[in-house]
Amino acid sequence: MYSPSIDKLIAVLKHLPSVGQHTAERFVFYWLKSGKKEVMETVNSLEELLSKVKSCETCWNFSDTNPCPICQDKTRNSETICVVSDPQAIPVLEHTGEFKGLYHVLRGTVDATDPDQIALLKISELLARLKNDVKEIILALNPDIAGETTMMYLEKEIKTKNPQIKITRLARGLPTGSDLQYADEVTLGNALKYRHQ
């Protein structure tokens, strides 16, 4: 339909999450209309991303340094590790100002339909970190089916490796300012189950 160069870039962009044919076409034609300067800024940013960003070999977050700034920070509580599925969760948790421990990024969740996928997650790396002075693991994964499956799997593996470690999850229930009559059954059930004084 388009020239081979345009079709090739559209095909590449369609591999991105939430990008379909029409969105990919809009991106390509936006770049074509905007001129070489903006395209080169995009190309340069991608080249810099590929050349500078690396995996932190402690927590598996992406960073320009290894270890990452959080793992390097000696003021953080090394006895508590917050486990997240993806790096995008770390800035969200950091913005609360409430967590002062360390992180571990799994790089995904357990897929019940693909048991081989477990080997791709950074679970063995998490278990290796339990040898240190870790006293608590906070499982901060999404409360969906994949997140719940992953948290149950991790609880079993962590308790097998070190039964003394305290394992906690993020609290669940009604958000502040919500109305009971509009809450779904799962949210309301969690609010009752995880109620506190």
Image (tube, rainbow, N blue to C red):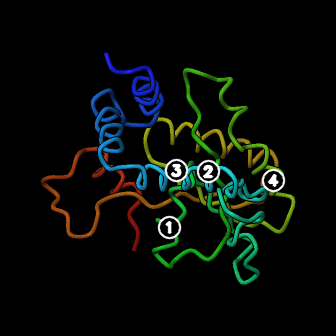
Inspect the image, locate mark 4, and give the three-letter code of the amino acid beneath it.
Answer: Asn
Label 1 or label 2, whichever comes before in sequence order: 2
Q: Give the label on residue 162, or none.
A: 4
Residue at figure coordinates x 56%, y 74% from the top left: 99
Inspect the image, locate mark 1, and give the three-letter code of the amino acid beneath it.
Answer: Leu
Q: Give the label on residue 93, or none.
A: 1
Q: Position of residue 30 (x, y in %)?
A: 30, 44
In this figure, which residue is indicated by the disc labeled 3?
A: 141
Label 2 or label 3, whichever comes before in sequence order: 2
- Give the alpha-carbon distance from disc 1 to disc 4, as whole Å: 26 Å
Q: Position of residue 130 (x, y in %)?
A: 81, 57
In this figure, which residue is indicated by the disc labeled 2?
A: 47
Residue situated furthest left in the rendering: 181
Mark 4, residues whose alpha carbon is within 10 Å: few (<14), some, or many (≥20)? some
Residue situated furthest front in the rendering: 36
* Mark nearer the viewer, 2 or 3: 2
Residue at figure coordinates x 76%, y 74% from the top left: 72
Residue at figure coordinates x 69%, y 63% from the top left: 64
Residue at figure coordinates x 44%, y 25% from the top left: 11
Which quadrant of the figure contains the N terminus? Answer: top left
CB-based contact (under 8 Å), mark 4 and mark 2: no
Inspect the image, locate mark 3, and give the three-letter code of the amino acid beneath it.
Answer: Leu
Q: Label 2, secondary structure: give it.
A: helix
